[in-house]
Amino acid sequence: QDGVLYAVNWRQHRLLWQHQGTASLSTAPEIFTLDAQPPATAERSPVAARKVVVCGDDDGAVYALDLATGATVWNVMLGGPIGSGLAASVGDEKLLAPYMPGPSNGGGLVCLSAKTGQTLWKFPATARDFGGCLCPPAWPHYPAGRLLAAFFASDDGWVYRFDAGGQTQWKSRIEGIQRRQGAVTLRGRTALFDNLGLLLVGGEDGAWRALDVKSGQIKWVFDAGGPCRLR
């Protein structure tokens, strides 16, 4: 809550570094290995890989710090508080960050370069409730961890699938179960089950829904009787 990120060596019980931000951290840190290279050979010298840790905060900042030193590598402002989680596509060094509406924008989902912080694409999705914290995105675990598809649930009742370039492949509107009509506020983390081809989404109307990852069609609904959220 104080905006400080700590790096600690647990074996030696020693603080390595700390970084003071300007607002409360809203996401768990994600670690990237940048410039990863194949093993060195007789013809090719080894290239040192660089590790960074990426966080988001309630001021709308997403920043990358050198994992070894805590030095700032890049810092970008998205204009609204960052949602409840980031999604890291390690193989192609991409980062998906949901963000809430701010003074200058309506919020949505942005894809950033983990190496530079450059915006690769954006998708606007206005959240209805500032306190909701948008769901962290999810994607299938393809070989090498590359981002070939991404799934995003907004709290206005829509679930989307994007390709690697940010183009919408499908969208599915989630309606309330019979006793609670209207669009459903979607909260918590989405769960992707690659082997079943299903995306699990929890709603504030008290129901779990499983969507087909290829079409967005709802395959089944389970009424749990209370707000459903994955942590």
Image (cartoon, rainbow, N blue to C red):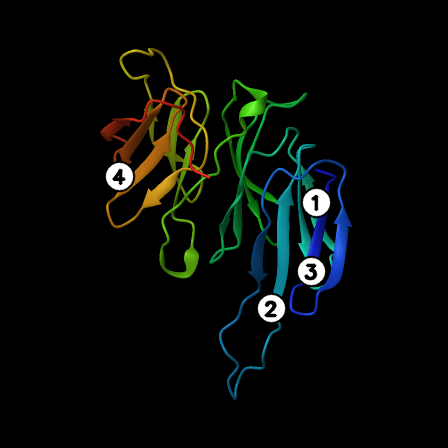
Which numbered disc covers residue 184? none
For disc 2, the marked residue is: 49
> Which badge, 3 or 2, is on the more N-terminal residue?
3
CB within 8 Å, label 2 to label 4: no
- The reply, left or right, for residue 15 in relation to residue 100 is right
Q: At x 42% / y 49%, what residue is drawn?
A: 147
> Which badge, 1 or 4, is on the more N-terminal residue?
1
Which numbered disc covers residue 214? 4
Residue found at the very far left of the displayed protein: 219
Mark 3, other Cα within 10 Å: few <14 / some 14–19 / many ≥20: few
For disc 3, the marked residue is: 8
Above or below for 20 versus 177: below
Q: CA distance from mark 1 to mark 4?
A: 35 Å
Q: At x 69% / y 60%, what residue is drawn?
A: 8
Residue found at the very far bottom of the displayed protein: 42
Which numbered disc, 3 or 4, marks the residue closer to the eye? 3
For disc 1, the marked residue is: 75
Mark 3 secondary-structure assignment: strand
Report the amino acid beneath label 2.
Ala
